[in-house]
Image: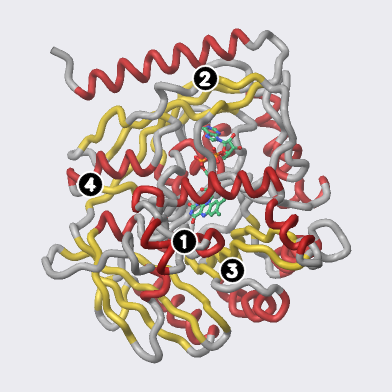
């Protein structure tokens, strides 16, 4: 009789065979792309003739090793499925991106971040080894000691060097509950000072800190959300119903305490897509009551958003009302912690978007990652803002202003959304020289798109 683990491995092997067959069937010079059922990419892409590679069968959890604290997973396995397999063992990935359908392959090649990033770095830093289908059509094993050039260049390459087919990642022990302390600040510089102190000491008021992120509602109202794992049982909150997690942070002064199960903590931002569910009316009490609980999740909102983008519904409504069209400003940027209050001050005066998400990070490894060269042994704050603003006279006016400010403050910008850099700037900022060498080696016939074409030219 076969075991679930054997079944998962058999399904994976069949999936790999289908992927390779679809690559070969595309012909020796055809461009290829992944045919994935879900996506968290925000860039709109021009229609492509590239052949879709078969990804079914590559979505499973192959094994969880509760002794070694590792998991072996298919490249298109979602974090939702992985967490469901690890939590029964009291384990979790070192970084769990907040949106349930983000996949392991997507988070490693397209970067990710969460409230453990101040102590665990970014998702790609917990990858022990992975199998990649390169642009040349070879399936290769990659680790720090084996094809180390590809291992280092893969994060932030967005599938332009190859596709992650299987990954083995490190896990960490977790307790069943998270005790939360939400700290209210009336000044952003004060919040940043406290955030920096927690990163350096790993504690707040003598209590160990496992999780750290924050939200800015305005210059006068911001919060740090400090989480500590605990096994102590007790009442827990539920933000998958009528209450909303982000609203639960708000209070006038001091510290507000709360508790969640570890499962609900990890997915606390998914139910309302941080706060972006508001755009679909899902936060209005009458609509919320009718909205099926199973569809209160980021993947459903992103499907709605894709329809909106495809048919330009928002801009049509603006035009009908005689208002100018709007520019989408959906970005996550990393700013050195010592410049982050300056960035936020500038942002709040320049870009009419709130709330803003804050998430501190420090790389785990001292070796660096050439395509996203934030510096080791230095703290950064990931600053996320996801909305629209009135369009200016130039295409992407506000996004360009933000790119300029981020570069001025020696920060970096994620590439999952719109970018406007010139080719030269992009080469400088995203490890152009290393990328060119690795690209020539692993995708010599350019079967996959080039990173600039994908990230800036929206191909
Ligand atoms: C609104 C928004 C908020 C976000 N917030 C967060 C956040 O809070 N935390 C966080 O961690 N991340 C966040 N992200 C970023 C997200 O982690 C990345 O966009 C990630 O790449 C998405 O993974 P996915 O599996 O959905 O990949 P997709 O969206 O399907 O693909 C993203 C890119 O990766 C490539 N790709 C996908 N799978 C593979 C693979 N197996 N091998 C190689 N290349 C592959 C695709 O070709 C594509 O170029 C956010 C993104 C958005 C749009």
* Nearer-N-terminus badge (2/4): 2
Alpha-carbon distance for marks 4 and 1? 29 Å
For label 4, the residue is 87
Establish if 45 lies above or below 359. Answer: above
Q: Label 3: which residue?
A: 336
Decide if residue 214 is on the left or right side of residue 439: left
Q: Secondary structure at mark 4?
A: helix
Query: Which mark sits nearer the N-terminus, 3 or 4?
Result: 4
Spatial distance from mark 2 to mark 4, Cα to Cα? 30 Å
User: For mark 1, what is the residue?
Assistant: 282
- Badge 1: residue crowd in 10 Å (few <14, some 14–19, many ≥20): many
Tell me the residue at 76%/66% (across/down).
321
- Farthest right residue in view: 393
Residue at 63% from the left image edge and 63% from the top image edge: 387
Instruction: Name the residue that disc number 2 marks.
Output: 54
Residue 360 position within the rendered picture, expressed as x and y whole percent measured from the top left: 48, 66
Residue that appears at 55% across and 48% down: 304
Mark nearest the camera among 1 and 2 is 1
């Amino acid at each position: 009789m076969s075991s679930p683990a054997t079944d998962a491995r058999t399904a994976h092997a069949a999936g790999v065979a289908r992927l390779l067959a679809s690559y070969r069937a595309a012909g020796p010079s055809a461009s290829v792309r992944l045919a994935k059922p879900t996506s968290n990419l925000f860039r709109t892409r021009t229609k492509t003739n590239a052949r879709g590679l078969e990804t079914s069968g590559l979505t499973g959890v192959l094994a969880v090793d509760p002794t070694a604290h590792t998991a072996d997973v298919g490249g298109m396995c979602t974090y939702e499925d992985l967490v469901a397999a690890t939590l029964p063992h009291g384990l979790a990935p070192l970084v769990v991106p907040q949106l349930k359908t983000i996949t392991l392959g997507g988070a490693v090649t397209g970067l990710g971040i969460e409230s453990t990033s101040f102590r665990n770095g970014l998702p790609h830093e917990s990858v022990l080894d992975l199998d990649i289908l390169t642009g040349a059509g070879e399936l290769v094993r990659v680790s720090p000691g084996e094809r180390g050039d590809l291992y280092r260049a893969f994060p932030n390459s967005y599938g332009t060097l190859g596709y992650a087919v299987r990954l083995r990642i490190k896990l960490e022990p977790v307790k069943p509950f998270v005790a939360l302390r939400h700290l209210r600040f009336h000044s952003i510089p004060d919040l940043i000072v406290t955030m920096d102190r927690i990163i350096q000491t790993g504690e707040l008021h003598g209590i160990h800190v496992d999780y750290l992120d924050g939200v800015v509602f305005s210059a006068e109202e911001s919060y740090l959300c400090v989480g500590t794992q605990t096994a102590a049982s007790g009442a827990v909150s539920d933000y998958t119903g009528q209450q909303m997690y982000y609203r639960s942070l708000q209070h006038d002064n001091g510290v507000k305490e709360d508790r969640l199960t570890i499962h609900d903590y990890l997915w606390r931002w998914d139910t309302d897509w941080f706060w972006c569910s508001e755009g679909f009316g899902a936060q209005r009490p009458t609509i919320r009551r009718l909205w099926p609980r199973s569809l209160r999740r980021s993947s459903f909102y992103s499907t709605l958003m894709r329809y909106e983008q495809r048919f330009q519904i928002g801009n049509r409504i603006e035009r009908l009302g005689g208002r100018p069209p709007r520019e989408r400003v959906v970005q996550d940027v990393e700013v050195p912690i010592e410049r982050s209050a300056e960035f936020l001050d500038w942002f709040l005066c320049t870009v009419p978007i709130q709330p803003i998400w804050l998430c501190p990070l420090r790389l785990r490894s001292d070796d660096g990652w050439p395509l996203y060269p934030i510096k080791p042994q230095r703290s950064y704050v990931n600053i996320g803002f996801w909305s629209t603003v009135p369009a200016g006279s130039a295409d992407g006016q506000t996004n360009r202003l933000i790119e300029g400010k981020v570069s001025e403050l020696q920060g970096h910008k994620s590439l999952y959304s719109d970018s406007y850099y010139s080719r030269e700037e992009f080469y400088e900022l995203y490890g152009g020289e290393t990328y060119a060498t690795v690209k020539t080696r692993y995708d010599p016939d350019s079967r996959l798109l080039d990173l600039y074409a994908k990230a800036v030219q929206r191909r």
